[in-house]
């Protein structure tokens, strides 16, 4: 029977990431990450925006926890900044960095809000990038040491751990497209980075288990729902190739312990996967307790005859949002049912989904974001349908709690349920925040 209520204990949350909201980039021993370097590179971000101040969450975090309470969420996903915890090469742990996150975790727990901790949301310490970053296998081991340090301090209290956020973006958007830090345009390095990120995930998960953390261990991937623009064999093959890059390069190693069978041919002109060592895939594919999915995109795919190897083109969405992608809640259902059917039976969590708008404060001091409410509502319905399809979905976290530093887009695009006035750092609940609070309190629509 279809119902709009969600299962008891369902996690209703929202999400943020350290570099996007914290600011305080020099406080208490933090050193630069690749995003500090990249955002300070002329031309890398819109208007030269940086995360130097962002939402000043480092100093205002307690007020932001109040916002969570107002939303009525029972969970909150945030990330820990590696360069706060291990600010220098050599692995010395900075207690002040850990103190900050411990305060947040304890405050959340005191307010019955379940902390969901992302251990890596793109802010690689710059000192590791100087040694090759994710192209260097050793980064995966350094990541393991960092994870162990966090687990030693917080392992008894954090119920959900996510090793990585969106390795697709770290690897391909950062190393092949050059739009994210470290700003490289080299596909061979991007594929190497995929492997070392996944290896880092596996090593990080191992280190969490060795520390006997009390919580569940998972990873978040951003998955898309590509489909052929027509029934021709060419378009079908093109959609499958895009699916390889965006989805299967991550899902297959994580859940089947092998790169997809078509990966070697697809990347044949850039790599022979010689960086994969014996045992790596077993480390990567060690069992998880849950799996996080960030969903933003469904797209039609056309064959591109001019490019026989890659050979795909995304069809521009007929009704795009300001970031150029469409609103397709049915794609969320597709992605969830696919993962549950083809890859894993572990509980799934929608760790992000959301829409960027040009929100503004009206003369009465209100922010009317009806499109965001419609977006959330349709995606929550899609999530509910996935549960009806048998998907073990246990949580839903709209992106985001706050407007924030949206990476290379800077501050121009707003994703938050709270409007941030960057000049005063005032937070103004948007209509979507009030609406979402009714959902969390009713446990459904
Ligand atoms: O802001 C990002 C987030 O850091 C990762 N997922 C997509 C969001 C919206 O662009």
Image (cartoon, rainbow, N blue to C red):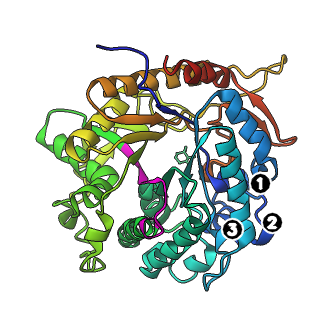
Picture coordinates of residue 234 (x, y %)? 15, 44
Circles 1 and 2: CB distance less than 8 Å? yes
Circles 3 and 1: CB distance less than 8 Å? no
Mark 1 vs ligand 1: CB below 8 Å:
no
Say which label, 1 or 2, has the lower sequence index.
2
Name the residue: 67% across, 49% down: 405
Q: Which mark is residue 58?
A: 1
Specify few, some or many for label 3: CA neighbours under 10 Å numbering under 14, 14-19, or 20 or more. Answer: many
Q: Which residue is mark 3?
A: 84
Name the residue: 60% across, 23% down: 436
Which region shows up in magenta? 208-223
Q: Which residue is mark 2?
A: 27
Picture coordinates of residue 299 (x, y %)? 34, 37
Q: Which mark is residue 69?
A: none
Is 358 displayed left or right of 251 in the figure? right
SS category of the residue bearing label 2 = helix
């Amino acid at each position: 029977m279809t119902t709009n209520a969600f299962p008891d204990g369902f996690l209703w949350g929202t999400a943020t990431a350290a570099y996007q909201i914290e600011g305080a980039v020099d406080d208490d021993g933090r050193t630069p990450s690749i995003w500090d370097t990249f955002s300070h590179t002329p031309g890398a971000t819109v208007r030269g925006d940086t995360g130097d101040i962002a939402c000043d969450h480092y100093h205002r975090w307690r007020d932001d926890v109040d916002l969570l309470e107002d939303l009525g969420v029972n969970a909150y996903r945030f990330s820990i900044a590696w360069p706060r915890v291990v600010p220098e090469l050599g692995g010395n742990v900075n207690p002040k960095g850990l103190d900050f996150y411990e305060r947040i975790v304890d405050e959340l727990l005191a307010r019955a809000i379940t902390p969901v901790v992302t251990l890596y949301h793109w802010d690689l310490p710059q000192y590791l990038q100087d040694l090759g970053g994710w192209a260097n296998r050793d980064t995966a081991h350094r990541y393991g040491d960092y994870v162990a340090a966090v687990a030693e301090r917080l392992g008894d209290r954090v119920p959900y751990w996510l090793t990585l956020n969106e390795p697709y973006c770290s690897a391909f958007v950062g190393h092949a497209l050059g739009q994210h830090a470290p700003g490289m345009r080299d596909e061979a390095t991007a594929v190497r980075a995929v492997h070392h990120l996944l290896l880092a995930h596996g090593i990080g998960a191992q280190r969490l288990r060795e520390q006997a953390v009390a919580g569940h261990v998972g990873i978040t991937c951003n998955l898309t729902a590509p489909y052929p623009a027509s029934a021709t064999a060419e378009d079908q093959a093109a959609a499958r190739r895009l699916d390889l890059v965006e989805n299967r390069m991550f899902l297959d190693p994580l859940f089947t312990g092998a790169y997809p069978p078509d990966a070697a041919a697809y990347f044949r002109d850039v790599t022979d996967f010689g960086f994969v060592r014996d045992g790596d895939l077993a480390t990567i594919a060690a069992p998880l307790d849950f799996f996080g999915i960030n969903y933003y995109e469904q797209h039609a795919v056309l064959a591109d005859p001019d490019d026989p190897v890659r050979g795909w083109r995304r069809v521009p969405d007929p009704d795009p949002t300001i970031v150029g992608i469409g609103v397709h809640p049915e794609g969320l259902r597709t992605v969830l049912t696919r993962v549950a059917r083809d890859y894993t039976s572990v509980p799934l969590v929608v760790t992000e989904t959301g829409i960027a708008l040009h929100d503004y404060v009206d003369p009465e001091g209100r922010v009317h974001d009806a499109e965001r409410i419609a977006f959330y509502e349709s995606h929550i319905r899609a999530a509910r349908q996935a549960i009806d399809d048998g998907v073990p979905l246990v949580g839903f976290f709209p992106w985001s709690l706050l407007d924030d530093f949206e990476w290379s887009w800077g501050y121009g695009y707003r994703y938050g349920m709270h409007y941030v006035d960057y000049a005063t750092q005032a937070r103004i609940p948007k209509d979507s925040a009030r609406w979402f609070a009714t959902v969390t309190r009713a446990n459904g629509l």
